[in-house]
Amino acid sequence: MQLFRRRLIACLLPAGLIVVAGCTGSDLDEYHAYEPAPAEVDSSDEIADPPAVAETEAPTPDGPAAENNDETDAADDSPAVAVADVEPEVADPEDETIPDTLPTSIEEAASEITQTAFPAPLPSADEPREIKLLVPEKEFRKEGPDGALRVTFEDLDLLKVLNMEPVPRNAPEYFPDWLKNLDGKRIRIRGFMRPDFGSENIRGFILARDIEACCFGPNTKSYHIIPTILKEGTTTDYIHLRPFDAVGVFRIQVEELTGDDGELEVAFVYVIEDAEVLSN
């Protein structure tokens, strides 16, 4: 049994664990401001062509229809006329979106822009949480002919029980009595089978909390998966993405594996031994 458990844990090692686009300087190098020489400036260039003005504004004997045509032509030939006819929007002084105060200097304006575009970073998810007891008491009901205690993965969630993240090697030292007292008790827990050890006549498997943990989801925690070893001389077949009950002896047993960074990480917190699968 001990040899198989170690092999089971060892097999889990491989399975358990702006672009900013800018502008180039080529366009700027090709830009040249044009300043006409004084000799080239002619007063006629600054004044609209008199014949053209007289031609568009002169009245015709055709009456209103001609006036309408003149207005249309003026609008087509001179966009400035159309723009001048549009009244600019004026902000409502009672509009709540207008700030009470405006920046009084370039430095203040730059500071506001910086704070808006680059807000302060949020706390890192890797920062350890303060460990504190959130569930001081809990009771379990007996279920089935063998009187196994009905336990759920929610009951074993160390983030919800102890605000524990990440899980340290000495995690059991912080466990409340009700959780410590589960050690050695026969429990009944529902989960999914993770496909780590084949599909037929398997002696053990990983019991996972949900589909994400079952299929190596990125948010899987060490208390979301439990190595499960079947009763001596019994086997089972892989159950594909279907929840089932497992009954067995619950053990608090922290196991560490080497992570991708070469450091030891807590891979499992619990183990179930002498188990049987209830597929109904």
Image: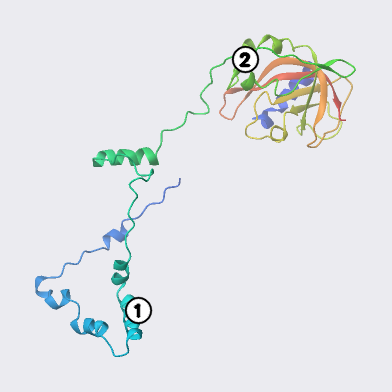
Residue, disc 1: 72
Residue 152, numbered circle: none
**Mark 2 residue crowding within 10 angstroms, few (<14) / some (14–19) / many (20+):** some
- Confirm or deny contact between disc 2 and disc 1 (CB under 8 A): no
Relative to 238, is 161 above or below? above
Residue lying farthest to the bottom in this orientation: 61
Query: Which comes before the other along the chain, label 2 or label 1?
Result: 1
Say which of 93 and 3 sits in front. 93
Left or right, 163 with reference to 246: left
Examine the image and state in which quarter residue 212 appears: top right
Q: Secondary structure at mark 1?
A: helix
Q: Which type of secondary structure does the marked residue at label 2 adopt?
A: helix
Q: Quadrant of the C terminus?
A: top right
Quarter of the image where the N terminus is located: top right
Residue at mark 2? 171
The quadrant in which residue 206 appears is top right
262 w.r.t. 30: above or below: above
Figure label count: 2
Residue 193 lies left or right of residue 110; in this view the side is right
- Nearer the viewer's eye, disc 2 or disc 1? 1
Other residues around mark 1 within 10 Å, as few (<14) / some (14–19) / many (≥20):
few
185 left or right of 79 in image: right
Amino acid residing under circle 1: Thr
Q: Position of residue 59 (x, y in %)?
A: 26, 86
Q: Position of residue 229 (x, y in %)?
A: 80, 22
How many angstroms separate mark 2 from mark 1 (CA)? 83 Å
Residue visible at 19% across and 77% down?
48
